[in-house]
């Protein structure tokens, strides 16, 4: 095995190594306690910005306690280097800061009591404006030039839904397009007169590849919407997928599924008239999803 060389040097004559087993530091003595009080006050107290000169303090190695004379010299060096003016300014700033903090605390507490125990920036009464569910009669419309469906649905709650009336407007092929549009408008007026309609819900235009068909469907929707608007009724539009999702729970549900679901919810027999059940589905979708915000 290769020998290991260790170089050992002696300390300067008269110097105490002061090296022993590790132990907790214990400061004793009047001057030491004063220094400890100052340092702890700085560490645990509030931060104070002081323009003080920087200086270097040597490291101290001790056993179970600092020698009294060593600590006295350290504090003396601290005071000497800091200077009497800086030390006096330090204590004055400290006292002023603590006095202001206590004064601010008292003022804050007085303000808190004066507000009746309320935090700053809050009022004693806080009003929560929650959206209100729909209540009332909805006129649902499934527009078509010669086979529009209408349904007046009275919605009071999820367990109190009634279909007041449903109509299929079947128009003869002999009638012109203008005559059909007039008949749609008259039917809307008739239902508005017979029932206390609050809102009107209508199905949005579906995508069709034929431009002429799109024009006809748009005209039928326009006749119904214009009539409702002239009577001062708000009109809401819903996509077919959204209607089926709201009523049945499936956006691709068939007309038969929509009719069966509505019959179960309302107890109304549509007798296979899918245009009427589709109109009722539009009305129920509006009642389920629309919310009134308090203003």
Image (cartoon, rainbow, N blue to C red):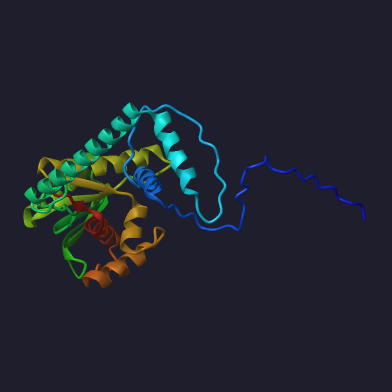
| Residue appearing at x 13%, y 43% in the figure | 107
Work out whether residue 134 can be spotted: yes
Work out whether residue 179 can be spotted: no
Please say if 155 is above or below 240. Answer: below
Please say if 80 is above or below 161. Answer: above
Comparing 47 with 211, the one in front is 47
Quadrant of the rendered structure where residue 99 is? top left
Comparing 103 with 236, the one in front is 103
Q: Position of residue 165 (x, y in %)?
A: 15, 62
Please say if 75 is above or below 160. Answer: above
Please say if 142 is above or below 218. Answer: below
Q: Position of residue 238 (x, y in %)?
A: 29, 49
| Residue appearing at x 29%, y 30% in the figure | 89
Q: Quadrant of the N terminus?
A: bottom right
| Residue appearing at x 69%, y 42% in the figure | 11
- Seen in the image, is 31 located left or right of residue 151? right
| Residue appearing at x 36%, y 63% in the figure | 249
Comparing 196 with 95, the one in front is 95
Q: Position of residue 24 (x, y in %)?
A: 51, 57
């Amino acid at each position: 095995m290769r020998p290991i060389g260790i170089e050992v040097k002696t300390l300067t004559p008269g110097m105490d190594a002061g090296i022993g087993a590790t132990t907790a530091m214990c400061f004793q003595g009047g001057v030491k306690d004063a220094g400890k009080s100052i340092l702890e006050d700085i560490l645990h107290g509030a931060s104070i910005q002081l323009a003080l000169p920087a200086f270097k303090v040597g490291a101290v190695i001790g056993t179970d306690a600092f020698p009294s004379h060593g600590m006295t010299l350290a504090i003396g060096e601290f005071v000497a280097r800091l200077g009497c003016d800086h030390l006096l300014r330090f204590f004055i700033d400290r006292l002023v800061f603590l006095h202001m903090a206590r004064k601010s605390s008292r003022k804050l507490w007085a303000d808190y009591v004066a507000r009746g125990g309320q935090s700053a920036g809050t009022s004693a009464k806080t009003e929560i404006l929650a959206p209100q569910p729909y209540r009332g009669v909805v006129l649902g419309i499934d527009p078509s030039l010669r086979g529009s469906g209408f349904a007046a649905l009275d919605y009071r709650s999820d367990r109190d839904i009634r279909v007041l009336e449903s109509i299929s407007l079947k128009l003869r092929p002999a009638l012109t397009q203008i005559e059909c549009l007039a008949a749609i408008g008259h039917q809307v007026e008739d239902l508005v007169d017979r029932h206390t309609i609050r809102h009107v819900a209508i199905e949005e235009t579906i995508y069709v590849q034929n431009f002429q068909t799109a024009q006809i469907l748009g005209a039928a929707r326009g006749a119904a919407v214009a009539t409702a608007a002239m009577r001062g009724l708000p009109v809401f539009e819903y996509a077919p997928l959204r209607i089926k999702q709201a009523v049945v729970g499936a956006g691709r549900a068939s007309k038969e599924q929509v009719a069966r679901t509505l019959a179960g919810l309302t107890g109304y027999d549509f007798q296979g008239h899918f245009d009427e059940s589709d109109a009722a589905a539009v009305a129920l979708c509006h009642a389920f999803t629309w919310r009134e915000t308090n203003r």
